[in-house]
Image (cartoon, rainbow, N blue to C red):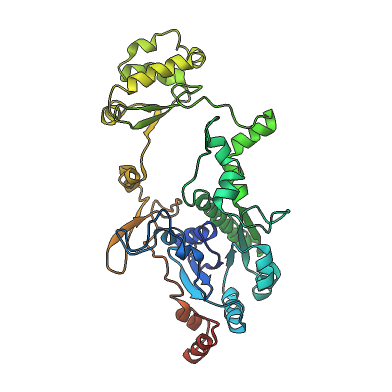
Amino acid sequence: MARIMEGVRVVELASWTFVPAAGAALADWGADVIKVEDIRGGDPGRQLVIGGLRRGTGKADVDFMMEIGNRGKRSIGLDLKTEGGREAFAKLIATADVFLTNWLPGPRKRAGVDVEDIRAMNPNIIIARGSGQGPRGQDADRGGFDSASYTARGGVAYALTPPGAEYPISQGPAFGDLPSGMTLAGGVAGALFHRQRTGEAKIVDVSLLGQAMWAMAPDITAAEFFGVDRIPVAQPGQALNPVTNRYKTSDGRWIQLVFLQPDRFWADFTRRIGRPELAEDKRFVPSANLIQNSAAATAELTATFAEHDLEHWTKVLADEKGVWSVMASPKEVLDDPQVSANDYLVTNTDDEGKSYRYIPAPVQYDETPPLPARSPEYGADTEVLLLELGYDWEQIAAAKEAGSVL
């Protein structure tokens, strides 16, 4: 991949996944991203276990969540509460183009790493902040995770939960973190461009709440225009447009149809699936009748798809001009030929040479994926980075002895 961020240095003081994911995207694009971790265990995400899936029990000896949000970075362990740690941090900031953080306003101020402190260390640095609820307002100093600030507070769970359901939908790990991190990386890119053009260093803010509202813009805007609490949707199994719906095959799989122009596709589609009589059925032609009689049309299609298995339908629909897709499992996505053709997975190896694939940032330049990259071990690059900052080995040893660096 064209390393468009070559020569850009990012200092990241962040944990978990949202803001670190922005750093991972910038590293994919060629930036030198330095992850600052404290000397008392580092990023708490290193201790996070998702679904009982522990490091060392999979196909490679890596932490899969750390790889997602921290690949391609270097890690330095500093104690910002000590004079030596703060000195090293200030030297690091002085060499950087971007300061990336998810620390809340209160802790930033107490630790001396707020805007005025960072700008005193480097007046030309871009400051990029990720938060739960945004940098202003009564909840600016409240923490946030995506299941709360994005999925719950941003309206995502409400809109995606079928009316009358006993429980709301639940999200998977980093469901809101990763798109929010990508947005923050894009904001950083824009700020770098602006600084190059004008010399002015901006503050960039992205919140999980704001990202959720962007994702839910149709629903929230409909609430503003029409006073509804969700865009009207059909009950599960039904659809206002029968050819924009999901249908179950005889082997329990699902096919998603998205024919937003029914008149354009209906006749050919019905003949293709072995139901040519539906193309002449006045209940379903033209599309105004199809929509009016959506329940009847949905019943016909439901029965038809239930007659055959997924293999049959993928062959039947292979040349279908309307948009459709199989509802794939994550394991199936790994082997999707379109994924392979576009290099949407990058192959890496662990220290024992065992290979595994991971997902890079979705933006490509010159149709080329980024180079393989690992997540750094905790504090692995402390000594190298201190040497780059001008420390000698005697000074490094003294700093370690004082407990200011890892």
- Count of marks, rendered view: 0
In the image: residue 196, left or right of residue 70: right
Of residues 401 and 23, which is closer to you in this image? 401
Question: In the image as oriented, which residue stretches furthest toward the bottom?
Answer: 394
Going 65% across and 65% down the picture, which residue do you hit? 199
Going 37% across and 30% down the picture, which residue do you hit? 255
Of residues 69 and 152, which is closer to you in this image? 152
> Whole-percent x and y of residue 189?
56, 58
> Whole-percent x and y of residue 187?
58, 55
In this rendering, is residue 2 above or below 110? above
> Whole-percent x and y of residue 102?
59, 62
Quarter of the image that includes the N terminus: bottom left
Going 52% across and 71% down the picture, which residue do you hit? 37
In this rendering, is residue 247 above or below 151? above
In this rendering, is residue 389 above or below 22? below
> Whole-percent x and y of residue 304?
33, 19
In this rendering, is residue 286 above or below 155? above
Is residue 52 visible in the rendered image? The answer is yes
Question: In the image as oriented, which residue stretches furthest toward the front?
Answer: 166
Question: In the image as oriented, which residue stretches furthest toward the right?
Answer: 138
Of residues 323 and 135, which is closer to you in this image? 135
Is residue 3 visible in the rendered image? The answer is no
Going 66% across and 61% down the picture, which residue do you hit? 202
